[in-house]
Amino acid sequence: MTEFFNIPKIVYEGKDSKNPFAFKHYNADEIVAGKPMKEQLKFAMSWWHTLGGDGTDMFGAGTADKSFGGKTGMEIARNKVLAGFELMHKLGISYFCFHDKDLVPEGDSLQEFQQNLDEIVPFIKEQMAKDSIRCLWGTANLFNHPRYMHGAGTACNADVYCYAAAQIKKALDITMALGGNGYVFWGGREGYETLLNTDMAFELENMAYLMKIAVEYARGKGYTGDFYIEPKPKEPTKHQYDFDAATVLAFLQKYGLEKDFKLNIEANHATLSAHTFQHELHVARINGAFGSIDANQGDPLLGWDTDQFPTNVYDAALAMYEVLKNGGFTNGGLNFDAKPRRASHTYEDIFLSYIAGMDTFALGLKIADKMIRDGRIDAFRADRYASFREGMGAKIRAKTADLCTLSDYALSLGRVSEPSSGRQEYLESIVNDVMFGG
Ligand code: XUL
Ligand code: CO
């Protein structure tokens, strides 16, 4: 068997290890919060960044070779499969995520694209069977080709809309064939640059209809997994329709899609929308719509979607706090929608990046579990609302007091009791204590 990466299998060596090619914190079978870490974290490899991304940016050519020794399009595609499974095996990653276009060349026609997909899917299934590696989610790339310059589901051209429908249908077929339990709609170019040429209501209605018929199609084929929308506020368009979790929830509710759809929250998209990663996860969770995570991080000084591997332990801990509060993942998981920096261009860097990301989320999980077991933060938050447990507060909660009753009560009070302190700094010091204390 050809080996693509001259790197050994990565094992857990513990926090004192200085071996760059070892996990310091991710110990797959260690039980944290009642489940092995590998089940709590459900790490996934992103096909596009890991097997496709060559470091090209708008100022310069690629710095990494991702042909994996292949010469023709389909040979490269097959080698990518083999390289991807070698990488997942060596890192102990059990899931992958893909766009249709990540897997094979598009060729000259939709027919050729679909034939190429039909050729690669059985080959991927063979590799999956060898290593019990599974598909976390699939999606269709509806943003790269020039035909999608005005959007796909929100395109101003009906033929383009149908082309997108064909890609979605095939991507759903493949996701189902690979046993995936998730299908993502990331609104690639679903947005606008100027309202001078855009009928927003028209476009959103079309988008919702495409999602509805996609759900009908997949459910009709017996698909029981989740559909996700992945919010993002901008980039590539100035104003992406799926701005943030709250905007997406309103869209789903308006068009009656909320039963089939959950959210795939990406850290870098959250910060682009001027929210924290935790905020977006929290909004999804309290609305029963938390689904999956695209794990990465942005750079606050750059302000675009840099898709860096997550190394910020503090953010990872607050994210995993939300995941644990949600009862963990069901169909979702942690997909590294992340790429090494352009100058980190070697195969070693891919492994080192995944190790960094996996160790960061392992630490995040352990800290989140400790925060919950510590209990001080949860107790403080619950206690902050103590006045709603009795008297007029309890009546408000029971929704039995009308506006006049509340007004009469306020008038009878004389003086309102002094508000309690929010104690933010104290609570932040508890997080530090949980992280670094004994
Ligand atoms: C783009 C992005 C996508 C989606 C899948 O910002 O995050 O890769 O995750 O289409
Ligand atoms: Co993403």
Image (cartoon, grey):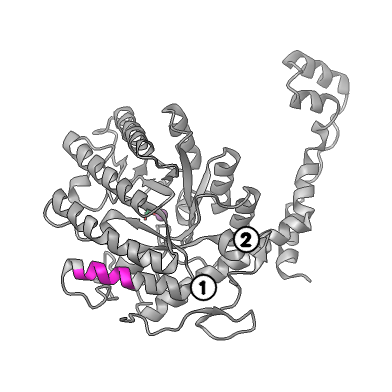
Q: Which mark is residue 356?
A: 1
Q: Residue furthest left?
A: 108
Where residue 255 sits: x, y (%)?
A: 41, 28
The answer to whether one can see residue 235 in this image is no
Q: At 76% across and 18% down in the image, what residue appears?
A: 400
Is the residue marked 1 within 8 Å of ligand 2, measured from its CB?
no
Q: Which residues are magenta?
A: 75-82
Q: At 73% across and 55% down in the image, what residue appears?
A: 372
Q: Secondary structure at mark 2?
A: helix
Name which of mark 2 and mark 1 comes first in the sequence: 2
The answer to whether one can see residue 394 in this image is yes
Marks 2/1: CA–CA distance: 15 Å
Identify the residue under disc 2: 317
Q: At 51% across and 68% down in the image, what residue appears?
A: 357
Q: Quadrant of residue 312?
A: bottom right
Please state the quadrant of the image where ligand 2 appears.
bottom left
Q: At 28% across and 64% down in the image, what residue appears?
A: 123
Judge the density around disc 2: few (<14), some (14-19), many (≥20) Cα neighbours within 10 Å: many
From the viewer's perspective, tell me whether residue 105 is left or right of residue 333: left
Where residue 88 sits: x, y (%)?
A: 43, 70
Is 288 magenta? The answer is: no
Is 81 magenta? The answer is: yes
Amino acid found under the numbered disc labelled 2: Ala
Q: Which mark is residue 161?
A: none
Amino acid found under the numbered disc labelled 1: Ala
Q: Residue furthest top?
A: 404
Where residue 334 sits: x, y (%)?
A: 50, 58
